[in-house]
């Protein structure tokens, strides 16, 4: 308590300024009082609402603004540096996407529901739905597994069955960026295993994250096209 009290008393004294070699020094830390308050950014969910905001002119903006595509799910609308070398962020656009737990085995029924509701329909998506929905529990582990190729028993009719190769590398389009854009297509490794409660399925990303560059480019192009249509290319710069 005594130490804190002494520090408080010392802090009440006015700072002493000393000039040494043409430089000015102070015996206390000085903090500049900022008289240039910044707005609290709005949080939006779509790129359409972001463009609508810009087009509306509802708020005063700097003469130069930046649209920063940080990642496939996040875009910032921020100003150029002001006289204090600071930026003002007006908009944070965050994509609202369903998501999928890649790299984790989940029960095949849950997997089929997610595959139908969180992926765009493609030929491989339909193939996985058909396969995962007809595979027989307890048959995946009967065959040799080299880490890529698997086999399982699938139902081909009411009473008939056959052995089939589990699809390995598949090309899918999960929802991973703003919904109004074309979703990036990429490869996944499909795996199955026999769990305690039945067959479990998993998808492992197999493109090294290249889809992220494609998604950022898609957002970048969408924003530039919209800015061009408004005739505001000189005022707004899109970076990604």
Image (spheres, rainbow, N blue to C red):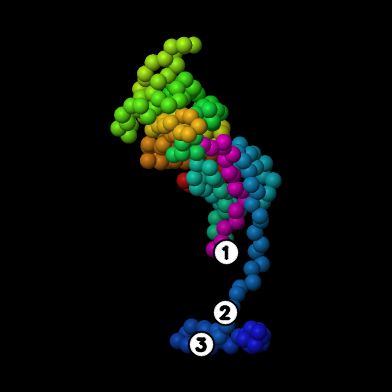
Distance from the alpha carbon under mark 1 to that under mark 2 = 22 Å
Say whether marks 1 and 2 touch (CB < 8 Å): no
Q: Earlier in the sequence, mark 2 or mark 3?
A: 3
Distance from the alpha carbon under mark 1 to that under mark 3 = 26 Å
Which secondary structure, mark 2? Answer: loop
Tell me how many marks there are.
3
Which secondary structure, mark 3? Answer: strand
Say whether marks 1 and 3 touch (CB < 8 Å): no
Residue 180 on image: x %, y %? 56, 32
Instruction: Name the residue that disc number 1 marks.
Output: 83
Instruction: Name the residue that disc number 2 marks.
Output: 29
> In this picture, is 3 found above or below 55?
below
Estimate how packed mark 3 is, as few (under 14), some (14 to 19) or many (20 or more) residues with alpha carbons within 10 Å.
Answer: few
- Which of the 4 image quarters holds residue 44? top right
Q: Residue at x 54, y 63 (%)?
A: 85
Instruction: Name the residue that disc number 3 marks.
Output: 19
Front-lying residue, 223 or 200: 200
**Secondary structure, magenta segment, majority class:** loop
Residue 206 on image: x %, y %? 38, 36
Tell me the magenta residue range.
Answer: 83-100
- Which of the 4 image quarters holds residue 31? bottom right
Can residue 169 be found in the magenta stretch?
no
Residue 42 lies left or right of residue 200; in this view the side is: right
Q: Earlier in the sequence, mark 1 or mark 2?
A: 2
Front-lying residue, 226 or 154: 154
């Amino acid at each position: 308590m005594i130490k804190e009290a002494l520090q408080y008393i010392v802090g009440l004294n006015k700072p002493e300024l000393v000039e040494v070699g043409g430089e000015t020094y102070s015996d206390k830390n000085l903090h500049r009082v900022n008289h240039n308050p910044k707005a609290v950014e709005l949080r939006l969910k779509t790129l359409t609402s972001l463009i609508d905001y810009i087009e509306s002119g509802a708020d005063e903006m700097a003469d130069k603004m930046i649209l920063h595509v940080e990642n496939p799910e996040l875009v910032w609308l921020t100003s150029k540096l002001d006289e204090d070398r600071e930026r003002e962020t007006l908009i944070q656009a965050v994509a609202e996407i369903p998501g999928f737990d890649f790299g984790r085995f989940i029960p095949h029924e849950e997997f089929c529901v997610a595959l139908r509701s969180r992926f765009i329909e493609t030929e491989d998506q339909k193939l996985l739905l058909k396969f995962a929905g007809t595979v027989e529990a307890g048959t995946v582990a009967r065959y040799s597994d080299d880490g890529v190729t698997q086999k399982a028993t699938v139902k081909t009719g009411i009473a008939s069955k056959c052995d089939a190769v589990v699809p390995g590398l598949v090309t899918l389009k999960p929802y991973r960026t703003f919904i109004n854009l074309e979703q990036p297509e990429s490869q996944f490794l499909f795996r199955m295993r026999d769990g305690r409660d039945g067959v479990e399925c998993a998808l492992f990303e197999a493109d090294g994250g290249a889809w992220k560059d494609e998604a950022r480019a898609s957002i970048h192009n969408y924003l530039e096209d919209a800015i061009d249509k408004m005739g505001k290319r000189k005022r707004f710069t899109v970076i990604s």
